[in-house]
Image (cartoon, rainbow, N blue to C red):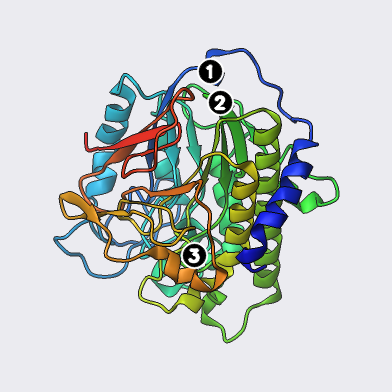
Amino acid sequence: MHMKNLPAKAALIACALGAIAPALADDDNDRDFDAATIAVYGDAPYGCKAAGTDTGPGSPGGCVGPDTLDGPNPQDTRQIQATPAFIDAINADPRVRLVMHAGDIHSGSNFCTFGYNSIIAKLWEQYKDPLVYTPGDNEWADCHKKNEGSNRQDSHGNFVDYAAGNPVANLALVRAMFFPKAGETLGKRKMKVASQALEFDPAHPTDAEYVENVMWEQSRVLFVTLNIPGGSNNDDDNWFGTATKTEMQLQEIAQRTAADLRWLDKAFARAQANGAKAVLIMAQADMWDLDGNIPSHIANYEVLLDRIAADTLAFGKPVLLINGDSHVYRSDNPLKANQPCAFENGPSVTPCADDAWFNHVGKGYNVPNFHRLVVHGSTFPLEYVRLTVDPRNNHSASENTFGPFSWERVIP
């Protein structure tokens, strides 16, 4: 779909969305009308324990690659060690009532083990507020890669990675450990959310697998999460370094992408029907990050970006996308050319040297009511973005405001 046709398509979508009754009726509790403050972060903790191959409960799993002095790397334990105090700081923030994690709970050189996941799950039990998490590529989609331990065996002949690094099996493990009850968040104070596992289209029964895709309404904003893994172009990197994709991989990509698109459409339909002031989308992937590759390497994201663009235009109100993946704070609108952009540059934030819009230039995206925020991650010290959502505000887009949203970076 070329984006020059979006206005007409958007009008049709708007009519369709307006005809859909809300699946979640508004309740009259305070979170629907009052301002809310949320701690948002991702790509953390990014280091891991010293190298090893034990995959039993409580084991940190193995690590490969060199250590450096520049920040958490495979054998750098600082982020793991700092996480309890980091969680305490967020718990102590008097404004924060919700935590959102944009994926990647370990580095791309950390083995994918039950033991490491258990460490993170145990740490996250200390959050006093609800925690909403969307999985990143490092904890499932990229477990097939050599640096993450795929097909490696210990001295006893046991695979060091869970299921020898099979991505589908590792996603199932993440779901079992971090989404134990569909429709309920992590954290001590649970929050009810709509889950695709419970609200799937009966015509697509496999959508019931996507317990990690959730949505909820708060402060007149519709929040939605989507399982879109970064780093491997929507899981496009061939599993285990094979020359072609296996049938299992092709099925994974097609099934999850279709489920994401249906969940996204459902979220916008609900936002439209319930009169939401804005929509916030959280996904792990930085769908504009070339990471040293050519633009064709991220082309598989365009089916998702096409739908985000069309739904955003049809909605006609502010839409904020939050992602992690590329690790460095960035505030921009990559769905419209020549828009202001702020980028983390050492200790300060400066204008961007690049326009991410050009990384999908052939699509001609032109969506003025969209903004994107990349949360900082993977380096030390840990930090979070304190995001405030106030339905009474309608800020112009800037480095730290957009519609009902405003935010600031916090290093506890």
Q: Secondary structure at mark 1?
A: loop
Q: Give coordinates of residue 236: x percent, y percent.
A: 56, 72
> Horizontally, is 359 left or right of 75 in the view?
right
Rendered location of residue 225, percent (x, y): 56, 44
Say which residue label 3 marks: 143
Dot label at residue 220: 2
Q: Secondary structure at mark 3?
A: loop
Left or right: residue 7 versus residue 85 is: right
**Separation (CA) of disc 1 from disc 3:** 42 Å
Neighbourhood count class around disc 1 (C-alpha, 10 Å): few under 14, some 14–19, many 20 upward: some
Q: Decide: marks 1, 2 in contact (CB < 8 A)?
A: yes
Across and down, in percent, residue 391 comes to 49, 25
Q: Is residue 373 above or below residue 359?
A: above
In this view of the protein, which residue sits in the foreground, 19 or 102? Answer: 19
x 29%, y 22%: residue: 92
What residue is pinned by disc 1? 33
User: Residue furthest toward the right?
Assistant: 203
Is residue 149 rendered to the left or right of residue 199? left
Q: Amino acid at mark 2?
A: Arg
Mark 3 or 2, which is nearer the eye? 2
264 is higher (above) or lower (below) than 279 = below
Residue extending farthest bottom:
243
Disc 1 marks a residue whose amino acid type is Phe
Callout 2: few (<14), some (14-19), or many (20+) C-alpha neighbours within 10 Å?
many
Callout 2: helix, strand or loop?
Answer: loop
